[in-house]
Amino acid sequence: MDDFKRFFSTFLLALGTYLILTFAAGVSIVEGTPLWGYEQLVLAFSVALIVASVTSHILCRKDDFRMLNPVRWGIMLVYLIPLFIEMVKANFDVAYRVITGNIRPGIVRIKPGLEKDLSITLLANSITLTPGTLTVDVDEDKKELYIHWIKVRKNPTETISGRFTKWIRRFAE
């Protein structure tokens, strides 16, 4: 049963990704053509089947299907709002630092307190998306991240990842 869950969850992820990426490709709203034609849907299912058969053992390495819960996906979508807000704030901060030259770059180590691989990956990507910070390395054994920071300050764990860690813990831990 777990093999079927792995295959099916990977299939749904691949199918959803394909359909989102091809959403409204070549569609004219005035003409009222459908979003996906028959050929496009056949191709989508074929690609999703191939991807699922080849990568399901990689994508679902552990028997942990907590991310199949739709509530977690909803929380993850809501997480995009604070992520976007932090990205905008960081853009202004970096612009200010570039104009004034007020920078003190360095690499800091943070221990966010997350245990799952997915959580740490999402945090590392969120930090990297935020201007002024870049995830350089992840220590998988100690669950620590090494971050290049444009302006090193006190308490790096709370300053860099505190706002993201709380949200990620809600849906990925």
Image (cartoon, rainbow, N blue to C red):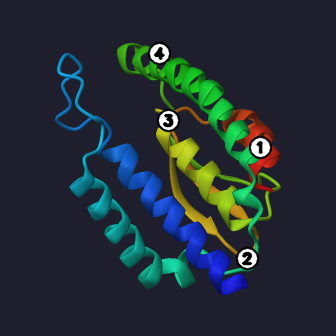
Q: Choose the circle earlier in sequence order: 2 or 4.
A: 4
At label 1, the amino acid type is Val
Q: Residue at x 64, y 49 (%)?
A: 123
State the image coordinates of residue 139 (x, y, percent, origin top left).
65, 70
Q: Residue at x 43, y 59 (%)?
A: 15
Q: Which residue is mark 2?
A: 141
Q: CB of mark 1 within 8 Å of CB of mark 3?
A: no
Q: Residues within 10 Å of mark 1 (few under 14, many from 20)?
A: few
Q: Choose the circle earlier in sequence order: 1 or 4.
A: 1
Judged by depth in the image, the label closer to the viewer, 2 or 3, is 2
Q: Residues within 10 Å of mark 3 (few under 14, many from 20)?
A: many
State the image coordinates of residue 14 (x, y, percent, origin top left).
44, 62
In the displayed structure, would residue 26 be above or below residue 144?
above
The numbered disc on residue 71 is: 1
Q: CA distance from mark 2 to mark 4?
A: 35 Å
Q: Which residue is mark 4?
A: 92
Q: Which residue is mark 3?
A: 150
At label 3, the amino acid type is Ile
At label 2, the amino acid type is Asp
